[in-house]
Amino acid sequence: MTRRRGLKRTSITRRLIAALTGTVVLFWLIAVGIGVYVVNKELSETFDGALQETAQRLMPLVVDDLADRDPAANPQTLENMERGLNREYLTYQVLDATGKLLLHSHDAPTTPYDVPLKIGFHNTAKYRIYTESSPNEALFLHVADAFKNRREAARESGVALLWPLLALIPGSILAIWFIVGRSLRPIDRLRSEIATKDGGNMAPLESDTLPHELQPIARSVNLLLGRLRSALEAEREFTANSAHELRTPIAGALAQTQRLIAELPKGPLVERAGRIETSLSNLGRLAEKLLQLSRAQAGIGTGDKPADLIAIVETIIGDYDRDTGTAGRILLENEADEKLIRNVDIDGFAIVMRNLLENALIHGPANGEVIVRIDGGIIRVLNGGHVLSQEELAGLKKRFWRGRTKASGSGLGLAIAERIVAQTGGRLDLLSPATGQVDGFEARIVLPEV
């Protein structure tokens, strides 16, 4: 499992570009190889034809030249006459029937070529030679073409074929990247739309503009979203109705229990009734949290109109100040001393702040202070307490998860707050120890910029 997670995931676009470019380059190389082979074959036939034609045209001239020359002439005379001319691509030697060298060109060796005195093509280690004879076979003419000349011509032909390939590879990569990227753009758009689907965005995908191959995927995803939307709506409706319907009987039972406690004489029955009162109070808070969770799942975070969040915080703190149990325990520090305007739902943000303040009051030290510090788009709620580990901090945002505490609670407050903050485009960070302290707990709301 660990090995699979470590594998590097590459995009389908890169894979296609690499595969198509590699395939095209491979085919081009094969085509160049075939072209070089054909060119070499054709060049060999051309060179052989030129070699044979040269020998056949040169033979009559050699016969006439030797007929007019002194038989005792030195065969080097012609070499001295031709000294200083350009390098010869074709060299020749003239021999008599006994193999004696009579005449040779400037670049030809002074010893006869090691080939038979027979009309036709012959090869040595360095030369391709065509032999021609006079009509009476008294003279033989060797016309030689060096293999290095042919290899040079073949090499230049291959390079001439490869240069366009090297120039076309970058162009083909760009062309393939453009074509593949344009062709896969609907897939990328579909992937992006699917990635946005969560509990707060269950709108169906737009499938009319997709290619024919992707429309079945979009239809299947829309069917799944429809079923999931129905299930979530049923769950939310059940949670909201249950919490709403339970509030009245719980409140009635709590009122009757409190009246019973007031009427009972002191004794074990009063203690038992007190435990019933505590259980009913916890049940009432749980019903309220379930109702908040239902509203949070419905996506109440974003508002249509801008609101001053500092005014909302001051109002909530004022409500706690009017309660004798929490009066004076919450302090507001507004470092910017300005308004904090954001497009959020007032009720949704109030639910967030109440949950964070309630969490700080309950789980902080008894009668300890809670500080609400506002700095730009960051709202911090700080309270005292022992330091929590990273594992404990990660678990606090889970539903019905409670840390190491004996205080009462449902384990839903931070989960509800995080969901609503995420709907506004912000995030909720939990820190321990608190910023600038050696212990304590900090809930930080980071709001998006306007």
Image (cartoon, rainbow, N blue to C red):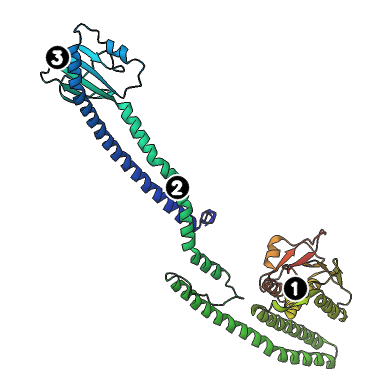
**At 25% from the left edge and 23% from the top edge, which residue is drawn?**
144
Lower sequence index among marks 2 and 3: 3
Indicate which label's residue lies in the foreground, 1 or 2. Answer: 2
Quadrant of the rendered image containing residue 150: top left
- Asked which secondary structure carries label 3, the reply is loop
Q: In this view, does 245 lie above or below 56?
A: below
- Residue at 21% x, 28% y is 52
The amino acid type found where label 1 is placed reads Arg
- For the C terminus, the image quarter is bottom right
| Circles 1, 2 touching at the beta carbon (< 8 Å) | no
Q: Which amino acid does label 3 sit on?
A: Ala
Q: Is residue 368 visible?
A: no
Camera-side residue: 242 or 224? Answer: 224
Find residue 159 and report its image quarter.
top left
For label 1, the residue is 342
> Residue 179: image x %, image y %?
46, 59
**Earlier-in-chain disc, 1 versus 2:** 2
Marker disc for residue 97:
3
Task: Tell me the residue that label 2 is attached to.
Answer: 169
Marks 1 and 2 sit apart, C-alpha to C-alpha, by 53 Å
